[in-house]
Image (spheres, rainbow, N blue to C red):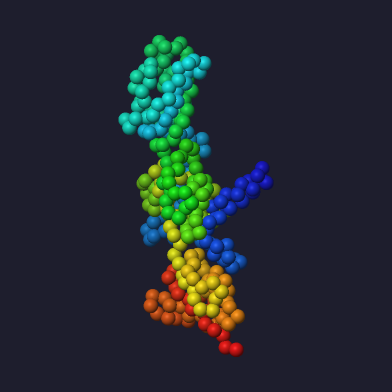
Amino acid sequence: MAIFDKLFTTSVAAILLAGAPAALAAQAPGVGPQVTPAPQGQSTVAIQAPSATEEYIVGPEDVIEVEVVGMPDRTRAKVYTDGTIQTNLLGKVHVAGKTPRQIGDQFAELFKAGGFYANPAVNVEVVNFASRYVTVLGAVAAPGLVPINRPYRMSEVLARVGGVTGAAAEYLVVRPEQGAEVRYNIRDLAVGDATQDPFVKPGDKIFAPNAELFYVSGQVRQPGSFPITSGMTVQQAIGRSGGLTEAGSAKKVTVTREGKKIKLSLDDKVQPGDVLMVGERLF
């Protein structure tokens, strides 16, 4: 089982981070990604996990199938906005707010009370999940609605939309129907323990923002704009741009920040919007 768990964790991590910024994997030893702090006054506590045995609650727009075991009677119907379905023998029956098991018991009692069957066994299945979903938008491979037919962790939902793209930041923003906005680090979702990979709830809105950028020009091999990661240093930024050219000097790095030009050392931190200029060394 330990080998299976290790392989599963490795596979999920690969999916979630496959499109993430290359800088995420190029960080210096000992410098790991960190959770981006939530705006002041907002909590970063993980969403409370539902029970692993929690059953799906049927709601409007779902499609269910009601079958009397061993009998030809079978009804497939869409749940109306008022929470009812239309059946052949019983007419309209209210089913919203119940699990398939509860609906099956409900129909068994109704069939028995109506004299249709003496002691029916009724099986109910949801054939189209539409009422309980999360919305995933932003820099992911396949944004859209993800049906929640069982308890799903954040990493599972992100995997179902193909993971983040190369332009994505290293965190997700989650806004539940009730409560404050929360941010989660993507790497923690992939390789952290269960406390760092919370369960989502129906109605959650999950947004993958584009990463903020910094810019490098001058004596580097690949000048251009790059996504910034938390804790990134000037040395890491130079490495992200391909490293120094033969004429480049690590001692001649300046940055234009908020309209002002300042000199930086290799251990200084890069900030979003920084424009780094790497000068030439003296021969």
- Write the residue at 49% across / 76% down: 217
- Write the residue at 42% across / 54% down: 138
In which image quadrant can residue 99 be found? top left
Q: Does 231 sit left or right of 86 as displayed? A: right
- Write the residue at 60% across / 49% down: 11
Q: Nearer the viewer, residue 164 or 270?
A: 164
Where is the C terminus found, in terms of image quarters? bottom right
Q: Where 275 falls versus 207 (above or below)?
A: below
Q: Where 228 falls versus 65 (above or below)?
A: below
In the rendered image, residue 205, in percent from the top left (x then y), is placed at 40, 48
- Write the residue at 42% across / 30% down: 63
Q: Where 257 falls versus 42 (above or below)?
A: below
In the rendered image, residue 181, in percent from the top left (x then y), is placed at 39, 53
Q: Is residue 242 visible?
A: yes
Q: Where 194 falls versus 53 (above or below)?
A: below
In which image quadrant can residue 134 be found? top left
In the rendered image, residue 40, in percent from the top left (x then y), is placed at 38, 61
Which residue is at the far bottom? Answer: 283
Q: Is residue 44 visible?
A: no
Q: How many marks?
A: 0
Where is the N terminus found, in terms of image quarters? top right
In the rendered image, residue 106, in percent from the top left (x then y), is placed at 41, 22
